[in-house]
Image: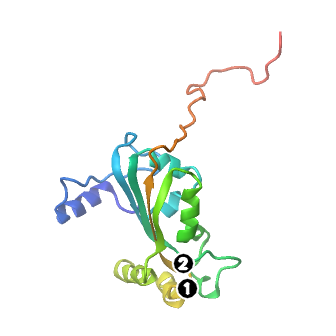
Amino acid sequence: MWFSASENIQRIRDAGVEEGVFPIHADARSLPFADEFFDAIVCIDSLYYYGTDDLYLNYLARFVKPGGQVGIAGAGLVREIEGSIPDHLREWWTQDLWCLHSAAWWRRHWERTGIIDIELADTMPDGWRLWLDWHRAVAPDNEAEINALEADRGSYLGYVRMVGRRQAQAKLTDDIVSLPLQYTKKPLLRTEK
């Protein structure tokens, strides 16, 4: 989202892994992969932007082989916020942050699909500290988020991780393809003859 594939290829080269890591800048809802292409899928600090959609896991799971793992790790909540935003988070909190959820929320979100068997769903110990350390390193001027993390100290904010395995027998629904792809001019109202 923030870095181009061209920027990422340099990072990949600097890390010496260009033989096995290939940067792609793509929309998460329009991925350029064949069904059952991957042995595993790992989403770091990204799934909460698009994965809260009730239909997304069905879409993503088609890219991993049956029995393959899907893992996520990212900013999240230790517990869901019920009611109004806690006072110590108000200055930082914006509407887009409602995409953050707890490990229990993610577990329910995935389990109800019948697509993934959950192997791990938790909040990383001291995840809020890791989030804070990361922010101090890459965005030290983001005082609002740093202050929120310092004030919260893991009460609500944390780092969520989850790992599941695609059920071999899971039935993935197909994308809707029954609509005509080309427009054909027809009267809006049809009359019987």
Classify mark 1: residues with Cα within 10 Å, few (<14), some (14-19) or many (20+): few
For the C terminus, the image quarter is: top right
Q: Is residue 131 depicted above or below 15 in this figure?
A: below
Residue 55 is at least partly visible in this image: yes
Left or right of 104: which side holds 120?
Answer: left
**Residue at x 62%, y 69% (from the top left corner):** 95
Which of 187/72 is in front?
72
Residues at circles 2 and 1 in contact by the CB criterion of under 8 Å: yes
| Residue 191, x across and y down, in percent | 82, 16
For the residues labelled 2 and 1, the Cα–Cα distance comes to 7 Å
Q: Secondary structure at mark 1?
A: loop
Q: Is residue 30 depicted above or below 147 in this figure?
A: above
* Colour approach in the figure: rainbow
**Residue at x 51%, y 83% (from the top left corner):** 144
Residue pointed to by mark 1: 155
| Residue 72, x across and y down, in percent | 43, 63
To which quarter of the image does residue 180 belong?
A: top right
Left or right of 102: which side holds 72?
Answer: left
